[in-house]
C-alpha cells in the first residue's frame, strides 16, 4: 500500500480564486440556474459563474501587504512551535495572493491542521495589521505526496515560485 509522506497545501487569499476563474476552479455547485457542478473536479473558466461569485463577495479581494505577509509567516512559525513536534513545514512560500505549504505527514488530520493554521494566521493578521476583513478563501487545495520524487519536485516548485513570478526568493526558514 502506498504511504502518504506529506501534503502540498495551497490557501488563496479571500476573493483571489473564485468559482469560474479562467484558470479553472474546484468549487462545488452553488447555483441551480447554471447547473450542478461536481465537487473535486477541475472545471473550466466560466465568466457567468465568476461574475456571480464576485457579486456574492461581502468584502473586497485581499492582497497581502508586506506586514500581512510577515504576520502570516510569524504565525506559521508559532504554530510549528506550539505543536510540540506534531507539525513541521518543509517548504513554504507566502505570496501577496496565496501561500503554498509542504507539510510532512504526522498522523494528524491534515484538514483540521490547515483549518487551525488559517485561523491562527487570520488572527495574527488582524492583531498585527490594520486589515480587519477576511484573510483566506473558504477551503483549500491539498494534494497528497506519496513518493520522494514528488516530494523533491514540490519543494523545487515552491522554491521557484517567487522567481518565476519575477520576485526575489524570500526565506521562511523559521517555519521549518
Image (tube, helix red, strand yellow):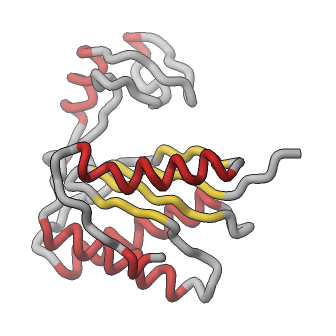
Farthest residue in the right direction? 1
Residue at the (30%, 60%) spot, across then down: 94
- Rendered view: 29 above or below 91: above
Q: Is residue 60 left or right of residue 121?
A: left
Q: Quick one: quadrant of the N terminus?
A: top right
State the image coordinates of residue 60 (x, y, percent, origin top left).
14, 47
Q: Position of residue 38 (x, y in %)?
A: 56, 21
Q: Residue at x 51, y 49 (%)?
A: 154
147 left or right of 66 in image: right
Q: Residue at x 38, y 11 (%)?
A: 33
- Res 123 → quadrant: bottom left
Relative vertical location of residue 59 with respect to residue 39 in this rendering, above or below: below
Residue lying furthest top: 34
Q: How many marks overall? A: 0
28 is higher (above) or lower (below) than 117: above
Residue 46 versus residue 99: which sits nearer the camera?
99
**Where residue 78 sits in the image (x, y, percent)?**
42, 84
Residues 126 and 117: in front is 117
> How far from the left and from the top, in percent, is residue 116?
50, 69
Give the left or right position of residue 176, taking residue 48 as reference.
Answer: right
Q: On screen, 155 above or below 87?
A: above
Between 6 and 97, which is closer to the camera in this rendering?
6
Amino acid at each position: 500500500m502506498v504511504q502518504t509522506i506529506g501534503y502540498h497545501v495551497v490557501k488563496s487569499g479571500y476573493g483571489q480564486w473564485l468559482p469560474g476563474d479562467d484558470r479553472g476552479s474546484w468549487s462545488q455547485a452553488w447555483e441551480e440556474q447554471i447547473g450542478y457542478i461536481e465537487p473535486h473536479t477541475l472545471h473550466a473558466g466560466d465568466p457567468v459563474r465568476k461574475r456571480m461569485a464576485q457579486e456574492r463577495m461581502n468584502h473586497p479581494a485581499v492582497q497581502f501587504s508586506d506586514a500581512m505577509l510577515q504576520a502570516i509567516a510569524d504565525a506559521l512559525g508559532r504554530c510549528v512551535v506550539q505543536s510540540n513536534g506534531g507539525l513541521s513545514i518543509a517548504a513554504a512560500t507566502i505570496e501577496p495572493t496565496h501561500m503554498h505549504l509542504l507539510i510532512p505527514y504526522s498522523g494528524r488530520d491534515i484538514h483540521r491542521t490547515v483549518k487551525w493554521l488559517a485561523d491562527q494566521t487570520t488572527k495574527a493578521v488582524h492583531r498585527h495589521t490594520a486589515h480587519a476583513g477576511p484573510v483566506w478563501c473558504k477551503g483549500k487545495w491539498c494534494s497528497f505526496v506519496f513518493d520522494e520524487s514528488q516530494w523533491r519536485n514540490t519543494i523545487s516548485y515552491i522554491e521557484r515560485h517567487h522567481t518565476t513570478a519575477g520576485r526575489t526568493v524570500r526565506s521562511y526558514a523559521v517555519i521549518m
